[in-house]
Image (cartoon, rainbow, N blue to C red):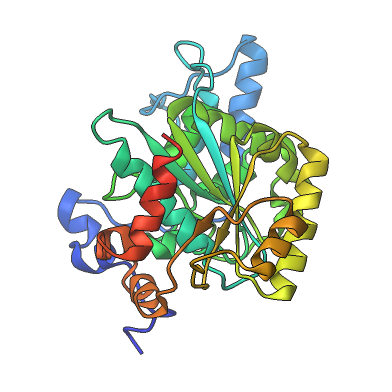
Amino acid sequence: MNDSLFFRTSRAERDRPPQHEMDGTHDAVIPLALHRAQLDVAKGQSREAGAMPRVNPMPVQPAESPAPVETAPATIERVVEQAVMEPPAEPAPRSRGRLYLVSRSRGGVGATTFAVNLAVGLCQAGQKTKQRVAIVDFDLQFGTVGSSLDLVDKGGLLALAQLDYEPDLHAVRAALQSHESGLSVLPAPRHPVPLDALDATRVQSIIEAMLASHDAVVVDLPPALVDWLEPLLRRAERVFMVTDLAVTSIDCAKRILDTFREDAPELRIEIVVGREKKPFLAGRVQREIATVLDQPLRHWLAFDPKRARLALDRGEPLLKMQPSGAWSRGIRKIVGGLQ
């Protein structure tokens, strides 16, 4: 059972020595709640001084003051808090990145696998020009982007959702995790949280901060229609709808795309067909589906369930595990069309 996907821990976590052996500290357990008392004190100081407080990482205690009780090492929540309270030295750069959204007609069609490999492919394609690519998992309840990349969530997205302030560039940077491929990753929380833990304003702040510091951002959307999708749809350069050709899948895909078009009429949508073998010539069924979706069936990914399952179990992108396979060639073709 230790090798099961459901009990597998990160290889990086298993192989590296304990944190206290590397730097003399002990691993911190990330709390779910932020340190509200510290924020309240900082806010009071800012009102008296008439400006945003500047956090001193080593506060000087008066001789008569008792020593601080808390001695635990910094966590992501504290780093994010300090980043929010610390005013940037200069204005944040204008948003310049491209936003790609990945949606699904139903579960199990390979949307997250597509999103992860699309992000890895963009990262590989931009190595020469040093393009920065990020992926965000907004499936707050059952997101698997982190597991697909063999990363353990450290609480970054949950910390951004719980901040008293709207996240800015510094807070978002502090919440991101790095992957060996060069990707910046914002995984979904390890434990399910309500979808309304985020709102439209906060989602927009997070995405704009990421687009200001990355050339491309891929977002794996939740399998639900929530009100905070609107700023993503308005900002997106393209939406990829991943689906198979089952009648129920096409029906759901049409309803989702119709809803998207109501919020963003100019939205560019592309259909990605997974778990299906591409016909040599489009038949009547394929033509009718394209008419129903009002989009051509532009992209087809080879159906390779055994290798797809193996990649998930290893926490390794298919582009890395089988770079010359038919599935990987399909992803690279899509990436090439985005450059």
Q: Is 83 above or below relative to 79?
A: above
Side (left or right) of 239 relative to 217: right
Query: Which of 2/270 is in front?
Result: 270
- Between 80 and 72, the one lying in front of the other is 80
Q: Given the current orientation, which residue lies at the most extreme bottom position?
A: 1
**Residue drawn at x 58%, y 66% as measured from the top left:** 142
Q: Is residue 75 visible?
A: no
Q: Position of residue 78 (x, y in %)?
A: 47, 40
Residue at the image position 73 percent from the left and 74 percent from the top: 247
Residue name at image x 55 percent, y 42 percent: 100
Q: Is residue 326 visible?
A: yes
Residue 183 picture location, percent across and down: 35, 44
User: In the rendered picture of this protein, how many numbered marks are placed on residues?
Assistant: 0
56 vs 267: above or below: above
Quadrant of the rendering where the N terminus is positioned: bottom left
Q: Position of residue 21 (x, y in %)?
A: 16, 57
Location of residue 174 by image quarter:
top left
- Left/right placement of residue 18 relative to residue 119 reads left
Q: Position of residue 333 (x, y in %)?
A: 39, 49
Q: Is residue 30 positioned above or below 130 on the image? A: below
At horizontal 65% and vertical 23% (from top left) the residue drawn is 44
Q: Is residue 280 left or right of residue 296?
A: left
Quadrant placement of the C terminus = top left
